[in-house]
Image (cartoon, grey):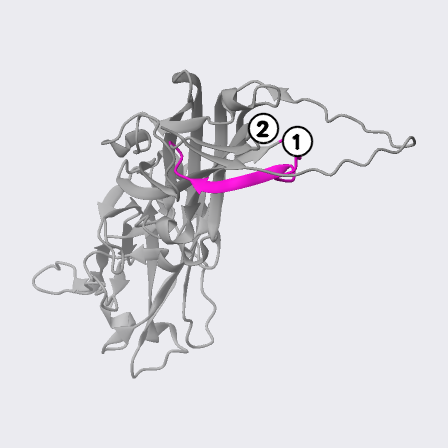
Amino acid sequence: MDRKETYFFVTLLLLFSALTITPAKAQRIEPTGRETPVTATFDKSSAPSQIDIWKDESGGIDSDNDSLWGRNTWVCLSSSDPATGQCRTSVTGVQDGNTTIPIVFTEQRSHLTQVINLTGYHNISVSIANGCWSAGVIGGPYQVYAAMEKNCGGVQNNDESLLTVYVTSQEMQKLPFGGIWKAELKMSLMQWSPTIKLADWNAHITLNVTDTNNQQIYLPEFGEAAPRVDLNMRPLPGTGGNQTQMNGAVTIDMCLYDGYGSNSTSFTLKFDDQQQGTKERNNAYFSIYSDHGDVNQDSGRIDYYVRMQAPDGKYMSMIRGEDVVIPDIQTAHIRPVHLPGIPQAVLCIPAPLELSTKTIDINSKQAGHYTGHLIVNFTPQL
């Protein structure tokens, strides 16, 4: 049964001929349902302190019949399954405090799920001031499903119930990685007497979570180690054992993680290297240089080409220092990988590389070991 509190007051009435009293205007707002879109965008490193789903939303008001909707409450559709919010499914008498509402969030690209807790409560209010209270909130917070009535001198009760539901920063931090996380909160607005359902209250929640600290170019074969790649320069078969030419090639498994569940609109890549010496090169060339020879001579440099396999399966030739835009990331092929510091597998976009030299006369190059640096810059457009 709902708890009732009664307040008594004494009024001293002084009558003056010039005194005019304007009666308070009655208020009536029918209880209605909600289809509330809630969208927030933030980075995991700086989540907002709180995101409101509903803030002091009215469950209806009738100041001429204050007990009709003043004791309205909200219940969940399930008390055991957090799919659309989990809490009591029936109304109770008054219980103070906040209600914890576990709910399932689903990342849209990977379809992985995470349960996080919403917090809800309701306050009660009066629309017309009296000898006990000013107009406004007079009680709360109460559990969302718990009815409450306060009475002023046996004349007037609270005539409105106001629902608040929100998610805290601490709960948002439970989302394990960046992406588009969605949840559907479904509740029913209930009348106390008679106990009947008045309306559906639904909130469509979208959290666009970026994780820029974990954006990375992932090279699976190297893990967390610094990648060192051998161009595999080998002599070509010659006639009668006379090997006069050589070439080299290597493939590198590369996967691009945007920190947003591969939900970016596009990626921008730029390939470059660290030039040594003063010789001008074709922009299609990347180079390795003799460790101990003269890098200012063509003989002290070996050029190679870089090709990248785009998400559509076609290979693209990279031009040194030029931006390459990869569109349509949201529909590109994806691959689950485990990255350091992220508790669950995330989705990256495969973009394998092929490094290859042209055929080179062996005697045109200085003998010895050659070293170079290939630099890849990756910028996702979220």
| Closer to viewer: mark 2 or mark 1 | 2
Residue 144: x and y in percent read 40, 34
Residue 166 lies in the magenta stretch: no
Q: Total label count?
A: 2
Please name whichever residue, 197 or 346, is drawn nearer the observer in this view of the structure. 197
The correct choice, above or below, for 28 with respect to 230 in the image is above
The correct choice, above or below, for 298 with respect to 116 in the image is below
Please name whichever residue, 34 or 192, is drawn nearer the observer in this view of the structure. 192
The three-letter amino acid code for the residue at tag 1 is: Ile
Residue 85: x and y in percent read 33, 33
Residue stretch in magenta: 127-145
The correct choice, above or below, for 250 with respect to 148 in the image is below
The three-letter amino acid code for the residue at tag 2 is: Gln
**Label 1 environment density (alpha carbons within 10 Å; few <14, some 14–19, many ≥20):** some
Pointer 1 residue? 128
Say if residue 265 shows up in the picture.
no
Badge 2 element: strand
User: Which residue is at a point 44% across and 30% down the rendered structure image?
Assistant: 203
Q: Assign the magenta stretch its main secondary structure.
A: loop
User: Which residue is at a point 39% across and 42% down the rendered structure image?
Assistant: 96
User: Which residue is at a point 66% across and 31% down the rendered structure image?
Assistant: 128
Pointer 2 residue? 156
Please name whichever residue, 20 or 238, is drawn nearer the observer in this view of the structure. 20
Give the residue at the far right of this rendering: 18
User: Which residue is at a point 51% across and 23% down the rendered structure image?
Assistant: 67
Q: Is residue 380 left or right of residue 82?
A: right
Badge 1 element: loop
